Amino acid sequence: MIHRNVDAALKAANVVDRASGRTLNAMAKGSALSRFESSKQRFWSALLISMKMPTVFEAIETELAAGNVAVVQLVSTAEAILDRRLAELSPQERAHLDLELSPRATMIDYLKNAFPTQQMRVFASSDGSLRSEPMRDEVGNMVECAEALATRDALIEELCAMPPVPAALDALLAHFGTSQVAEVTGRSRRIVIGSDGSQKLERRGARANLSETQAFMDGLKPILVFSDAGGTGRSYHADLTCRTADRRRVHFLLEPGWRADVAIQGLGRTHRTNQSMPPVFRPVTTDCKGERRFISTIARRLDSLGALTRGQRQTGGQNLFDPADNLESDYAREALTQWYHLLHGNKLSSVNMESFQGMTGLKLTDEDGTLLEKLPPIQRWLNRILALRIATQNAIFDEYMGLIQARIDAAREAGTFDVGVETIRAEQIITRSEQTLRTDPVTGAETRLLRLELHLRPRVMHWKRLMQIWDGTSEIAYLWNSRSKRVALKVPSWSITDEEGRIVPMCQLVRPTGGTRMQEIAMWASLWKEIDRDEFQKLWEAEASEAEAKVDIETVNVATGLLLPVWHRLPQDDVRVWRIDDGQGISIIGRLIPPAAMAELQSAFGLDGTVELTAAELGAAAQKGTGVAIPGLGGATLTTALVNGSRRLEIRNYRPEDRERLKVHGVFSEVIQYKTRLFIPLDRSNEIIEAILLMTRI
């Protein structure tokens, strides 16, 4: 509503030409739109936080009834709005307070102070182009545009007629009362509701934060709310020495803010040493997809914080956010470019080009309808999306997030998705060989190539844990595969968007030792069939017990030590950094070198010796997506292939005369699209590969 009227006011005041829409005064237009976007962003942030409060009230009441205590973390306190409102009141009005501290005050302040109402005078510049400058009357006073003033006043009247939405902090105090809520925010004054229902201005002294904290720790007040300003240097954990050591802290992250370090520091106030029990963290979000604008910024900064402080991105966000939450990543920017092209091609069902440009004010095409070469960046697009109706926001974001997820899924599949340092937890680590790749001439630091034997025990999800997560969820199915004789729980998963802008429904198959994502249509065309719950539970528990008793032995090659000087000389197919840890003090950080690249790497660094791969190493290398040559088989390679939605081991580039010999040793063939392809059953892969290697040596 305001956005459309800002455009009309800019034209009425001659900041923008009425006929052509060309900007006549870029500085005035930029100032008006910049202030508007800034105010709009603050307004939506505060409004979304206020929308969460009814659910937060219910959740806090549930936790208190369970014997826990609640801690609410936020950033905004509405103190600045309160100060401005109090400054506008007369002495009589201050004596009978009736204030509404609503997020809409942010937009009303914008209309009063920054809405473009100054009249401009149009003139021709020296090059003949039209420009405009502020108009003044005969005594030198600025001239106001009557049309813009009328528009502004009408907008203020309409906004003030809307029902107010209380600020989050004040709503919390009003709902539970100051006798229940300890406020540690640093506010010097606040509005409280008296016993007679009237508003009263309460002043808070310098020691209010200290006394409120103590009241919470002593159990006098079961709810504590804190902000950045009030929380500095204080702890709210279940300290063994405090009176509420036996009550778990349930930490509601209501508003993470914009600073990643402060958000993490706030979470740490309820999770300290010397505590009787850890807290439960509960981030609070709405189902309005536009809120991802705010989650995105904190997710990106948490990623950066983790990368800078510990070299491990997940330590920054403590896994609170998914990689797709970062809407300022390369994946998100590439997806936005594709979204623009799909919009221009009229392939999206959420919105068309004309209506999108009209609703957001973004210019995406030139005069002849061609998509602009320089399109609006992600931050501007996100800010404009915030102003749309929630249903429209959600529809746009469903398609956009599908494009991001498709890219992330593809990057994970290819092994190029950068998630920082990933960990391999081994039962035992045995060093089989060690070679020095490089020694730094200045520091003497070494880059080493290790050949490690890892004894790995799979991480198993037991039936009880599975049901804690998924029992009662709609759209789940109990599945059994007639080929592998394995079970999987089908659960809902996020969709992706294909190259034509179509939403592709996806599902996730949860297994005792892992899980995969599949397209819904491909899953039902596969060998997975539904079975009843009791039979599924019996098979799941049997499979989990079998996996838990199993220890796999895997041999890996790791480049470790000083990696940066040789980074460009290492294989670039998979650039992930791994931590190999046995949980008993041995920890190795480095790059995994695929078996197929070992010979070339040793040759590049002038090392002696060749690596003869075992059957297990060949199978493992192929299953990780890195095709590997089969020795003695005339250039044939072993790789993975996705056939009918299931992953297989495939022998490619085999010689025709080897086909029957390979089938004798357990390889099976299928004719797919007029081509005979050879596959190795996964459940007997090591046995069959070993037989093939023996065959090639004869």
Image: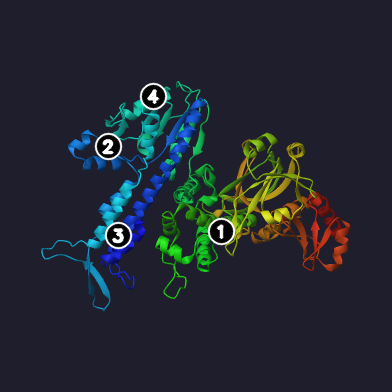
Q: Is residue 114 visible?
A: no
Q: CA distance from mark 1 to mark 4?
A: 50 Å
Query: What residue type is disc 2 on?
Result: Asp
Q: Is residue 424 visible?
A: yes
Circle 3 residues within 10 Å: few <14, some 14–19, many ≥20: few
Circle 1 residues within 10 Å: few <14, some 14–19, many ≥20: many
Circle 2 residues within 10 Å: few <14, some 14–19, many ≥20: few
Judging from the image, what secondary structure is the residue with disc 2 in?
Answer: loop
Q: Circle 2 sits on which residue?
A: 98
Report the quarter where the C terminus lies. Answer: bottom right
Q: Quadrant of residue 210?
A: top left
Q: Circle 3 sits on which residue?
A: 31
Q: CA distance from mark 4 to mark 3?
A: 47 Å
* Circles 2, 3 touching at the beta carbon (< 8 Å): no
Look at 50% across and 29% down and name the residue there: 63
User: Can you tell which mark lies on residue 215?
Assistant: 4
Report the quarter where the N terminus lies. Answer: bottom left
* Circles 1, 4 touching at the beta carbon (< 8 Å): no
Look at 28% across and 34% down and name the residue there: 189
Q: Closer to the N terminus: mark 1 or mark 2?
A: 2
Q: Closer to the N terminus: mark 2 or mark 3?
A: 3
x and y, in percent, of residue 269 in the image: 44, 33
* Circles 1, 2 touching at the beta carbon (< 8 Å): no
Residue sitting nearer the eye, 542 or 568? 542
x and y, in percent, of residue 611 in the image: 74, 55
Circle 4 residues within 10 Å: few <14, some 14–19, many ≥20: some
Query: What residue type is disc 1 on?
Result: Leu
Q: Circle 1 sits on which residue?
A: 403
| Dot in front, 4 or 2 | 2
